[in-house]
Image (spheres, helix red, strand yellow):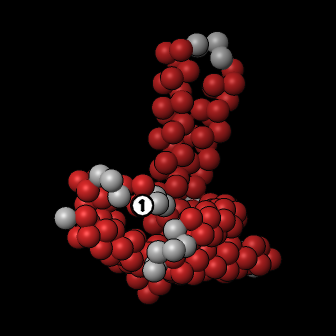
């Protein structure tokens, strides 16, 4: 997340930040609600998106290796790993979903650290506690993912519901920051 206070001396940039934070906040809230109420759809969508991303990255890595150095065996190995991993996830999403659950556990722990940093960076602001709350929630979600490793079936609803909760609160945080940025915009006019 961006600390919008760096834009205080540039009202045009602050207004753009406010507008986009508001729009993205609403989108994140809607996506979060989909994940909360339809966790299977969110889990499958997330897994398939990740599979396509790996497959596309593998194809690009192969094109780059072909153009840059056809004899680069590490480039071809990377291409193979990305293409095979993406194809396996697309053909059989459940094991990919479990792997994504493990990755998300690590991601949410890092996201929590980033949110804590942001919260204390904007602390004098009235909305700093929302970033702190978002960090606490991300920490809890990361711990949930790590605890679910013993029962991979839980990953089906965990990925959908907990990613949905995280997106929902990211959206709330963005709307809050948009509101605070709006107050700075109005005070600068």
- Which residue occupies the extreme right position in the image? 150
**Location of residue 141 by image quarter:** bottom right
- Which residue occupies the extreme left position in the image? 189
Comparing 106 with 83, the one in front is: 106
Residue 3 position (above or below residue 128): above
**Location of residue 120 by image quarter:** bottom right
Query: How far across and down, in percent of the image, does residue 46 sit?
Result: 49, 64
Comparing 89 with 107, the one in front is: 107
Q: Residue at x 54, y 36 (%)?
A: 58
Mark 1 closeness class: few <14, some 14–19, many ≥20 residues within 10 Å: some
Query: How far across and down, in percent of the image, does residue 153 sit?
Result: 67, 78
Q: Is residue 16 left or right of residue 79?
A: left
Q: Residue at x 53, y 14 (%)?
A: 68
Number of marks drawn:
1
Q: Secondary structure at mark 1?
A: helix
Query: How far across and down, in percent of the image, does residue 119 sit?
Result: 56, 71
Q: Residue at x 23, y 70 (%)?
A: 186
Comparing 96 with 165, the one in front is: 165
Figure quadrant of the C terminus? bottom left
Q: Is residue 78 left or right of residue 50?
A: right
Q: Is residue 72 left or right of residue 1?
A: right
Residue 44 position (above or below residue 12): below
Residue 55 position (above or below residue 73): below
The reply to whether residue 181 is in sight is yes
The reply to whether residue 27 is in sight is no
Q: Residue at x 48, y 24 (%)?
A: 63
Query: How far across and down, in percent of the image, does residue 137 sit?
Result: 60, 80
Comparing 156 with 114, the one in front is: 114
The residue at which mark 1 appears reads as 5
């Amino acid at each position: 997340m961006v600390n919008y206070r760096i834009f205080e001396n540039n009202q045009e940039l602050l207004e753009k930040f406010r507008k986009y934070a508001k729009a993205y906040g609403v989108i994140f809230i809607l996506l979060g609600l989909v994940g909360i109420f339809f966790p299977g759809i969110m889990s499958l969508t997330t897994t398939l998106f990740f599979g396509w991303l790996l497959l596309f990255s593998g194809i690009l890595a192969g094109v780059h290796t072909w153009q840059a150095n056809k004899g680069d065996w590490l480039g071809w190995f990377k291409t193979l790993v990305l293409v095979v991993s993406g194809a396996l996830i697309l053909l059989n999403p459940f094991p990919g979903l479990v792997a994504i659950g493990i990755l998300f556990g690590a991601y949410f722990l890092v996201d929590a650290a980033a949110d804590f940093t942001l919260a204390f960076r904007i602390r004098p602001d009235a909305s700093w506690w929302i970033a702190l709350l978002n960090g606490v929630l991300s920490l809890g979600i990361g711990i949930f993912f790590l605890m679910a490793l013993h029962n991979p079936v839980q990953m089906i609803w965990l990925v959908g519901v907990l990613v949905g909760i995280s997106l929902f609160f990211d959206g709330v945080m963005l709307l809050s920051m948009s509101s605070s940025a709006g107050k700075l915009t109005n005070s600068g006019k």
